[in-house]
Amino acid sequence: MSMHKLLFQVQRPLLQFTSKKFVLPIIRIETRSVSNMSKTVSIADQSVPITMGTPVTRATSDILNQVLEFGPFKDWVSRLDKAQREKKNEMDIHSIEIQNTDLFGCGKLGFVKLKADVRFKENGKSAPGIVFMRGGSVSMLIILRCPEKEDHILLTMQPRVPVGSLDFPELPAGMLDGSGNFAGTAAKEIYEETGLSIKEHELIDLTHEAYGDRWQGMYPSAGGCDEFIRLFMCIKYMDQFDIQALEGKLTGLRDKGENITLKLVALKDAWNIAPDAKLLSTLALYNALVEHKPELFPRNK
């Protein structure tokens, strides 16, 4: 048997495997063919093999099974299936390799990095197929309105290590929980990150108003990530004292590592304060919808 097809693993004597065993007095060395780890998914009637990019163990086998049941992965396969059918299968999807995964504290699968080998049938050239998979999220623009005063919004300031910032200004946001209740998730995140109670019916889904069901949300990095963001906004009427009291307030779920400080800024100045894609996209949709669907945004309470 060729050695490059075998994986040697030390296990406790009581563990049982179906592959050939080499039993020693103290340890047991097991072998397993790497090819046994390949599974498939169907995309536009094409059977696409999925493999792990790391050495095969029981742990990686379990992870592959988790990936196959991972909501964002299933959604991605479904969208790719639909796109292939609409485009008359103009692409060949040769394989999908799971390169890495990250688990959240509860052991739940959080992020997946994969590489899809996708090529144009016409010329055989590859399309970029490296994906950082994390699924959808929501963000909220909260306009604080006081009669005869200019509108303000709330930004959160928190560490964002990936961009090298310890106090990045951005809109409140949170990951979807898989329930499909976008507004409910948004209202929950608003309360956790700002302390403000917002009812679901008070939220306006700007992405839905703009695109209907054509798109799931705004895609901040479609060249490398599957993430979509539903952009919500609401108008909260408050007196000036309560609005000012929010400045510098400490919020967030500390037991989950959140360390958030609220920042109050004038709505008209927000574009020049925060380089946040969620904020800039929300402002663009808000300004467009104010013009094209003004009935969504009554000026008076």
Image (cartoon, rainbow, N blue to C red):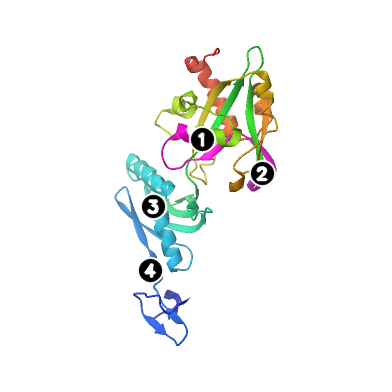
In whole angstroms, how far apart are the C-alphas of marks 1 and 3? Answer: 25 Å
The residue where tag 2 is placed is 159
Residues marked 2 and 3 touching at CB (< 8 Å): no
In whole angstroms, how far apart are the C-alphas of marks 3 and 4? Answer: 21 Å
Q: Work out whether residue 172 or residue 146 is closer to the camera in this orientation and state it.
A: 146
Q: Provide the secondary structure element on which disc 4 rests.
A: helix
The residue where tag 4 is placed is 35
Q: Earlier in the sequence, mark 2 or mark 1?
A: 2
| Quarter of the image where the N terminus is located | bottom left
Q: In this view, does 137 lie to the left or right of 21?
A: right
Q: Which amino acid does label 3 sit on?
A: Glu
177 falls in the magenta region? yes
In whole angstroms, how far apart are the C-alphas of marks 2 and 1? Answer: 21 Å
Q: Provide the secondary structure element on which disc 2 rests.
A: strand
Q: Which of marks 1 and 3 is in front?
A: 1
- Please provide the residue range marked out in magenta: 161-185
Q: Which of marks 3 and 4 is in front?
A: 3
Q: Residues within 10 Å of mark 3 (few under 14, many from 20)?
A: few
Q: Which of marks 3 and 4 is nearer the N terminus?
A: 4
